[in-house]
Image: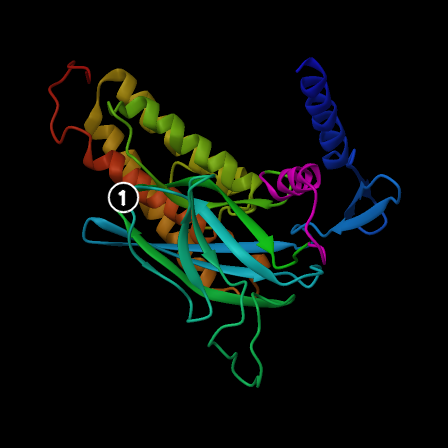
Amino acid sequence: MKKIKLLIFGLCIILVKLESQNATYKYDPASGNYIVFFGQDTIEKLTFYPSTKIVPLVRAWIVLVKDTFRYRYQITNSNLSEDHLSEFYLPNNSMITNIRKPNDGWYFGYHEVIDKLNWSNTKVNHYTPPGKDYYEIGVPPGTSVDGFVYSCTGLPSIVDCFFQSSRLSGADHELPGDVVDILKTLEGFPLNYVKGATVGPVLPPEPFIAITFLDTLLSYTHQSVTLGWLKPKRDGDREDDERSDDGIVKNIEKRIEKAKKELVKGDSIKARQELEKLVKKVETLYKRNEKEKYESDMVMTSEAYALLKYNTEYLINHLPSKQKKGEKEK
């Protein structure tokens, strides 16, 4: 009986050794691919083509219709990309409704593992691009797709977005378990996705504190500059208490700081006046873009416009309409 147990145990060890391929992988900087090595008597190689050989760009337009925001996105696959762009991910949000896709070539779903909204175009489908007599997967380099749309009551905020290309890796035969595990690792977040930033909805803060929300507006201003959504150019549309040489960004920051000082003093009426001037300024700057021939000359993109206009209006609507002299906001 003991010999039988030892024999069974020995067979188990042999089977484990046979199943274990001692799989390893390394990154090849010349090709940008990962090479997986496995096997025992003969070393086999499998090339993993990451879905990151793309340079994606995203634009967002937000419109307020009654009490609901309509978010629309356009994605561009840059000329610098090597592959077609086929996956577009945004943060999941329970408030989102009326989701639409650009055309029948795209599918919409929810990625449960990473909790993301996902538009996907990775399979041959019934959509034929204008002027083409064949089916095209995803977004080729140098082209754009518009029409990723949904509605939401959430306030515009800066959120992460993710992209993937349509490259796939595989083998002609069944792979050992440790090789499959390596491929799963290489295919997962954040290694196999390109990360970007755009505007998406967030829940309004609860409890709402006006002074803290003004800090949020300042943060959106600074981040918009970093992301290229707001240009620190000379301010040609200044108010009487502003200086043109201070520039657009500094004048916006000063306006927010003035509103904050009034709130600290307990004067919500004067704070409201400062914020109304800010909304007027944002609208003026955005309208100026219509006169510019090139997008690079724009001083404020639709993203910065949505962040500053709608969040400032939300703050105005949550300030007391009347306040007694000397009475501070709670």
Residue 236 x %, y %? 48, 50
Observer-nearest residue: 294 or 156? 156
Residue 189 is left or right of residue 254, and the answer is right
State which region is magenta. 170-189
Left-right relation of 117 to 262 = right
Residue located 29% across and 28% down the image: 205
Q: Residue at x 45, y 31 (%)?
A: 219
Q: Amino acid at mark 1?
A: Met
Residue 37 falls left or right of residue 58: right
Residue 36 against residue 214 in the figure, above or below: below
Mark 1 secondary-structure assignment: loop
Q: Which residue is mark 1?
A: 95
Q: Nearer the viewer, residue 71 or 15?
A: 15
> For the image shown, how many numbered marks are present on the structure?
1
Return the residue nearer the eye: 274 or 109: 109
Residue 253 position within the rendered picture, expressed as x and y whole percent measured from the top left:
44, 33
Could you classify mark 1 by the number of other residues whose Cα lies within 10 Å: few (under 14), some (14-19), or many (20 or more)?
few
